[in-house]
Amino acid sequence: MLIAAVLFATVLLRFAIVVGVVYLILPKAFSCPRCADKLALIHHPILRRLVPQVEHRWCMGCGWSGLARRMRDRRRTVRQSRVISRAARS
């Protein structure tokens, strides 16, 4: 039984390593890996539920289509300073 558990653990570890490497190989979501043009999002509700870190993207410039890592849009995540927040409240 111990041998089966060790073999199962090595298979799980190998699977985790492969998934991690494949995720790191995926391009970031904002630019095309071929022409560096902006990528358009293709909505897949099933893919979004199964693997929320991955998006299906399409390049309008060269026609590349594939999976890309989901990245936060930096323009949305910029926080306002305290001074601006206080001025907006008063």
Image (cartoon, rainbow, N blue to C red):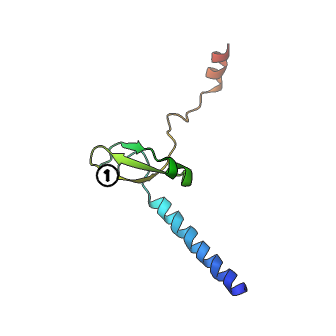
Q: Residue at x 31, y 52 (%)?
A: 64
Q: Report the quarter where the C terminus lies.
A: top right
Q: Nearer the viewer, residue 21 or 45?
A: 45
Q: Residue at x 69, y 81 (%)?
A: 5
Report x, y in % for residue 60. 30, 43
Q: Give residue 50's quadrant in the image.
A: bottom right
Q: Report the quarter where the N terminus lies.
A: bottom right
Question: Residue most toward the top?
Answer: 90
Report x, y in % for residue 31. 38, 46
Q: Residue at x 48, y 60 (%)?
A: 24
Give left or right: position of 23 versus 33.
right
Q: Is residue 35 above or below residue 87?
A: below
Question: Residue most toward the front?
Answer: 46
Amino acid type indicated by mark 1: Trp
Label 1, on which residue?
64
Q: Residue at x 35, y 52 (%)?
A: 65
SS state under label 1: loop
Q: Is residue 90 above or below residue 79?
A: above
